Amino acid sequence: MTNLYDRHSALLARAVEALRTRAFWTPFPEVPSGKVYGETAKADGIAGFEALVGSAFDIPGHPETRRVGRENAPWGQTLAISYPAADPATLIAACEKASHSWASADPETRAGILLEALTRLNAMSFLIGHATMHTTGQAFPMAFQAGGPHAQDRGLEAVAAAYAEMTGSATAATWVKPQGKRDPITLEKRWRIVPRGMSLMIGCQTFPNWNGYPGLFASLATGNTVIVKPHPGAILPLALTVKVLREVLAEEGFSPDVVLLAADEPGAEITKALVETRAFSIIDYTGSSVFAAWLRKNADGALVFTEETGVNSITITGTDDFAGMCDNIAFSLSLYSGQMCTSPQNLYLSKGGIETDEGHKSFDEVVGGIVAAIDRLLEDGAQASSVCGAIANAATFERVAKARHAGRVVRESRETGLGASATPLLVVADDREGGLERDECFGPVSFFIACKDAHDAIARASAIAAEKGAITAALYATDGALIEEAATAFSKAGVNLSVNLTGNIYVNQSAAFSDYHVTGANPSGNASLTDTAFVAPRFRRVMIRWPRAA
């Protein structure tokens, strides 16, 4: 066994410090450059991906009773990769058998193994980027970042947060209580870190690694074994992850079954069967609120950490950079065709319009400015494809079609010409009771909502966030009092607020080590990546004490 903790201790210390300061930091460069990842990294990544297409994905020693695999093909690239699969009982038995030695390892040993896995995964970022691209529909630059370095950042963040929490208090102490004239009572005390038990990580289709790594690495760092259940449309990114983790575990003398893959196929999912075994102490889930509610009902006391559906908003009350505002909103609405948990959906503004650096703009002029900015951004087909990507799930097209009847269409959704695509559909909502804008309409659909005034716009946007959930909110305002009013309203609703974003920073983005992703304070999720509440409940401290001999 090598000392991986010593090898990576400086990286871990720097990550813990970054969590404390919340300043920008990353050890994993986000630029897919040969100067960073090696001159052959791009070619090697493509060759590695092509070698996997049409093959039987090998995970040495993994339980296997059959092969499964019918993944998504949003860019038209049929993967035809098969993965080892086994029934829930077989996977659970293997995971339980591996649990004792992993639970007994100290936090340093576990952290060293996980950091070694993350550095190996980082070196594979080009391969992971192509795996992410061809399963999720993200364009390659985004797939490289979200499936590779940005996900690795979130994994490292989880390890650092867990390590800081586990080592934040003494593991041994001599306790001396004075007794006046009598001899003091002296006890020796020791505390052990005891993991909660087996963990189930249920992956999502659009961001399998980015959303999956926090729970996966937090559970492993705190000594829990994990069964990784990918979305059947996006298995490959997490299969590569599981394979690397198992390789490092085996090299370090642990059973690789500390981490297992629960692959399945569309229409024959095993998620419910896994949960209904009641074998799991921790469940991490990203997806719809409907299934999250089912999980909570059937998890039999397990800790359930969720990121769920919500209605993200932009409130426009004024701006001193109208063109910059329109361009920023255009990119936010177009990025990955709105298939992000952080994508804006509802845009609230006064029916009387707003004041800008270009003079007063009516409601329709603000709408028209944003529509024109989207059209400029997407007028070139290649650029449109690189921004919008492809549609991951056919149900998204159905939502787009339905949204056309929700009000006045001010921008029609179009194809980019590459893959299964759809550019943003923009609708001025009828704003009637029970309208589509009242719930999440996942995908390239946004609604403009006319309000009485700026105060009404803030109130309505924050109210729907509190009622339905929201992960992000944006505000454009020139009045400091309105900014403070919005900050108070959205804080009360439990939503992270971005104010007056222009230039190359967007409301969709969430930075590891600095931004807490989701607050856990509204219906869009009960967990925040990656705060103390996300990592600390995954383990317990158990004390052993005895009198010290005189």
Image: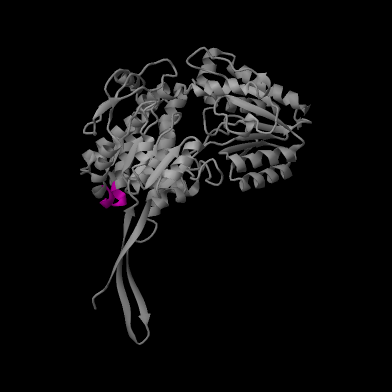
Instruction: Tell me if 450 is positioned left or right of 144 in this view.
Output: right
Q: Which residues are magenta?
A: 102-109
Q: Nearer the viewer, residue 277 or 359?
A: 277
Residue 33 rendering spot, x and y as whole percentages: 41, 24
What kind of secondary structure does the magenta stretch mostly adopt? helix
Q: Position of residue 423 (x, y in %)?
A: 57, 19
Res 358 quadrant in image? top right
Q: Which color scheme did the rendering employ for the protein? A: one colour
Q: Residue at x 40, y 30 (%)?
A: 231
- Examine the structure image and report whether residue 524 is included in the region drawn in magenta: no
**Quadrant in which the C terminus is drawn:** bottom left
- Please indicate, yes or no, whether residue 51 appears anywhere in the rendered image: yes
Looking at the picture, does residue 143 appear above or below residue 313?
Answer: above
Q: Is residue 55 above or below residue 125?
A: above
Residue 306 pos. (x, y %): 47, 41
Up the image or down, 137 lies above or below 475; here it is above
- Image quarter for residue 295? top left
Percent of width and height locating residue 418: 49, 13
Q: Nearer the viewer, residue 344 or 293?
A: 293
* Residue 319 seen: no
Drawn side of residue 338 relative to residue 209, left or right: right
- Nearer to me, 195 or 398: 398
Going by the image, does 320 lie left or right of 421?
right
Residue at image position (28%, 30%) is: 85
